[in-house]
Image: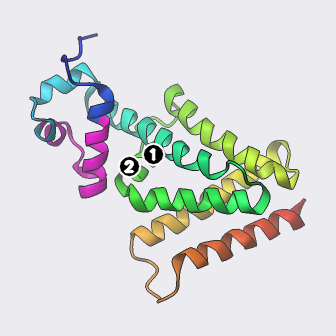
């Protein structure tokens, strides 16, 4: 493996890649654009990534870790519906603040990659812990996590694409949706 250029750290590169993604869209995060932004030559990036797929993988992991870092504090000191609503708001807030990085979390070149799986597993584990207040176990807990993720991703995606044109408070809509989800879990036990 080639030795990274002195002074250029992976975290710094990923921060800049994330800024590019958030500002211009994930499709604009190329090795050439990233190198230009970092004021280096594109071949220097091969010291850190195995081409564009390697960059996308590292950016996905970086994004999953950032998302976890937003969700985890939201769940501290609260439980039940309050915790579920708090992590839901944190999730949607992350997608609003970091639309390109959020997209990267969904677009890892190989979602079966062990490193990508480990980063995503932290979010699943956190969600399962939050849902423990509803006494869900085993597969039912995982089904609920899938349902929650589907709601939050759908909401975030529709919002990002301008799908909510009515003059209604989006945060209130999210709260109503999550409350309905919670009621569904309670009845489904």
Mark 1 closeness class: few <14, some 14–19, many ≥20 residues within 10 Å: many
Q: Mark 2 highlights which residue?
A: 101
Q: Measured along the vertical axis of the image, is residue 52 above or below residue 87?
A: above
- Tell me the magenta residue range: 14-35
Total count of labels:
2
- The answer to whether residue 158 is above or below residue 138 is below
> Measured from the top left, where is residue 122 in percent x and y?
61, 37
Which residue is pictured at 19% across the width and 39% down the height? 34
Which quadrant of the figure has residue 68? top right
Report whether 4 appears left or right of 147.
left
Q: Quadrant of residue 172?
A: bottom right
Q: Residues within 10 Å of mark 2 (few under 14, many from 20)?
A: many
Q: Is residue 6 left or right of residue 109?
A: left
**Is residue 22 located in the magenta-colored stretch of the structure?**
yes
Q: Are marks 1 and 2 in contact (CB under 8 Å)?
A: yes
Q: Which image quadrant for residue 119?
A: top right
Residue 106: x percent and y percent? 46, 48
Residue 162 position within the rendered picture, expressed as x and y whole percent measured from the top left: 39, 76
For label 1, the SS is helix
Quadrant assignment for the N terminus: top left
The residue that appears at 65% across and 43% down in the rendered structure is: 124
Could you tell me which residue is drawn at 31 percent across and 36 percent down? 14
Judging from the image, the colouring scheme is rainbow
Q: Looking at the picture, does residue 15 appear above or below residue 50?
A: below
């Amino acid at each position: 493996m080639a030795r990274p250029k002195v002074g250029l750290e992976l975290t710094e590169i990923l921060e800049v890649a994330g800024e590019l993604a958030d500002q211009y869209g994930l499709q604009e995060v190329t090795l050439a654009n990233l190198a230009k932004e970092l004021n280096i030559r594109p071949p220097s990036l091969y010291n850190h990534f195995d081409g564009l797929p390697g960059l996308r993988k590292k950016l996905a992991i970086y994004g999953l870790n950032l998302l976890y870092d937003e969700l985890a504090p939201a769940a501290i000191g609260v439980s039940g519906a309050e915790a579920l609503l708090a992590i839901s708001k944190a999730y949607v807030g992350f997608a609003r603040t970091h639309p390109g990085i959020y997209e990267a979390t969904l677009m890892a070149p190989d979602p079966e990659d062990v490193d990508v799986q480990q980063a995503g597993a932290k979010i699943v584990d956190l969600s399962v812990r939050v849902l423990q207040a509803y006494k869900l176990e085993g597969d039912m807990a995982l089904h609920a996590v899938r349902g929650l993720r589907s709601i939050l991703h759908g909401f975030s995606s529709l919002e990002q694409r301008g799908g909510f044109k009515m003059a209604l408070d989006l945060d209130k809509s999210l709260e109503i949706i999550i409350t309905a989800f919670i009621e569904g879990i309670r009845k489904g036990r």
